[in-house]
Image (cartoon, rainbow, N blue to C red):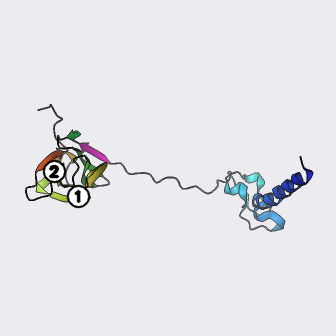
């Protein structure tokens, strides 16, 4: 090994470790105390009451470092879905009613392998004749997609809601290719 190369490597390590040494020492480094007991150990939650400086007040429990934000907790969403259906025309869909955070909405998952663009109309029906309807453009292609109604304030029990998605050719005749419902029976169930 080349001694010159080892010397350069050692010098680089010393230079790189100086900021780390200052962070570990914290504000007490060089006799400057801000009374907060900072430094890398406290930032990582590793300091304890025996490491406090005379100017800092003694703590009765170990210091806990700053809490790192984790992923936000996702609210619970309940769903009621019909079966996955497919048509001989190349359309597959499953339609659901979703309920979460006091809101209800309809969603239809679909795949269009028909080779042509389609129109989808998704209707969410609720208690007292309440209906929300949305039209979605369904592109030609094999990629899965979804159509979703706006989220509405829930009224009544979850079983009083249903959703229906209808997939049709977007022309004057509007040939219906598939109807999928959240409470549809599975194929062969009658």
Residue positioned 77% across, 52% down in the render: 50
Does residue 153 show up?
Answer: no
Does residue 167 show up?
Answer: yes
Residue positioned 16% across, 50% down in the render: 166
Q: CA distance from mark 2 to mark 1?
A: 12 Å
As drawn, which residue projects farthest toward the front? 115
The residue segment tinted magenta is 77-82
- Mark 2, residue position: 166
Badge number at residue 32: none
Instruction: Establish if 102 lies above or below 32.
Output: above
Question: In terms of depth relative to the viewer, which is nearer, 149 or 63?
Answer: 149
Q: Secondary structure at mark 2?
A: strand
**Residue 37 falls left or right of residue 9:** left
- Crowding around mark 2 (Cα neighbors within 10 Å: few <14, some 14 to 19, many 20+) is some
Residue 18 image position (x, y, % from top left):
80, 60
**Residue 127 falls left or right of residue 106:** left
Quadrant where the C terminus sits is: top left
**Residue 134 falls left or right of residue 102:** left
Residue 168 image position (x, y, % from top left):
15, 52
Question: In terms of depth relative to the viewer, which is nearer, 102 or 7?
Answer: 7
Q: Secondary structure at mark 1?
A: strand
**Residue 106 falls left or right of residue 70:** left
- Mark 1, residue position: 137
Question: In terms of depth relative to the viewer, which is nearer, 124 or 171?
Answer: 171
Instruction: Establish if 150 lies above or below 186.
Output: below
Precedes in sequence: disc 2 or disc 1: 1
């Amino acid at each position: 090994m080349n001694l010159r190369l080892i010397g350069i490597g050692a010098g680089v390590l010393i230079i790189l470790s100086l900021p780390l040494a200052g962070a570990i020492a914290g504000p007490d480094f060089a006799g400057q105390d801000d009374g907060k007991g900072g430094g890398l150990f406290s930032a990582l939650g590793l300091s304890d009451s025996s490491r406090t400086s005379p100017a800092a007040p003694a703590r009765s429990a170990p210091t806990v470092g700053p809490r790192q934000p984790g992923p936000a907790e996702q609210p619970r969403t309940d769903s009621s879905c019909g079966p996955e259906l497919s048509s001989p025309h190349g359309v597959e869909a499953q339609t659901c009613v979703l309920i979460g955070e006091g809101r209800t909405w309809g969603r239809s998952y679909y795949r269009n392998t028909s080779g042509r663009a389609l129109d989808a109309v998704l209707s969410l029906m609720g208690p007292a004749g309440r209906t929300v309807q949305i039209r979605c453009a369904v592109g030609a292609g094999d990629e899965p997609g979804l159509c979703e109604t706006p989220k509405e304030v829930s009224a009544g029990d979850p079983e009083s809601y249903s959703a229906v998605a209808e997939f049709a050719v977007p022309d004057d005749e509007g040939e219906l290719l598939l109807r999928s419902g959240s409470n549809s029976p599975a194929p062969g169930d009658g």
